[in-house]
Amino acid sequence: MDDTQVSVFEIVLLFVGITVAVLGFLFINRVYLIEGKISWLMVIAIFNWLMLLVLFVSLSIAVDVSKRHLNETRKIVDMLSQKKGKKIRY
């Protein structure tokens, strides 16, 4: 595993994602209990809520991939700078 640290952005993203998941479920459940049936507006609300959750997951994956990419780029730069300093002869 990489030795990367958790950033403030990732903590905020986790907090907001969990909050959206819980509150969205509670709101949709409350509307269902009040109405007693599933309407087209309810289906649209559920679909939009699920899309929002997918967006949060894909955002967190994108952040992780960009961190890994940055670490790999730094490793490559370090390797190239070390190789340049040695001046290999053939």
Image (cartoon, grey):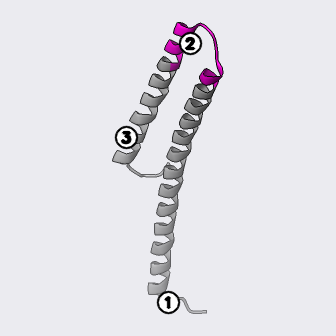
**Dominant SS type (magenta):** helix
Which residue is disc 2 drawn over?
A: 32
Q: Disc 1 vs disc 3: which is toward the camera?
A: 3
Q: Label 2: how many residues lie within 10 Å, few (<14), some (14-19) or many (20+)?
A: some
Residue drawn at x 52%, y 14% is 31
Residue 82's spot in the image, x, y percent?
A: 45, 79
Residues at marks 3 and 2, CA–CA distance in whole angstroms: 30 Å
Q: Is residue 31 above or below residue 17?
A: above
Which region is colored magenta?
Answer: 28-43
Q: Label 3: how many residues lie within 10 Å, few (<14), some (14-19) or many (20+)?
A: few
Residues at marks 2 and 1, CA–CA distance in whole angstroms: 72 Å
Q: Where is residue 10, by image quadrant?
A: top left
The numbered disc on residue 87 is: 1
Q: Label 1: how many residues lie within 10 Å, few (<14), some (14-19) or many (20+)?
A: few
Is 44 in the magenta?
Answer: no
Which residue is disc 3 drawn over?
A: 12
Residue drawn at x 47%, y 61% is 71
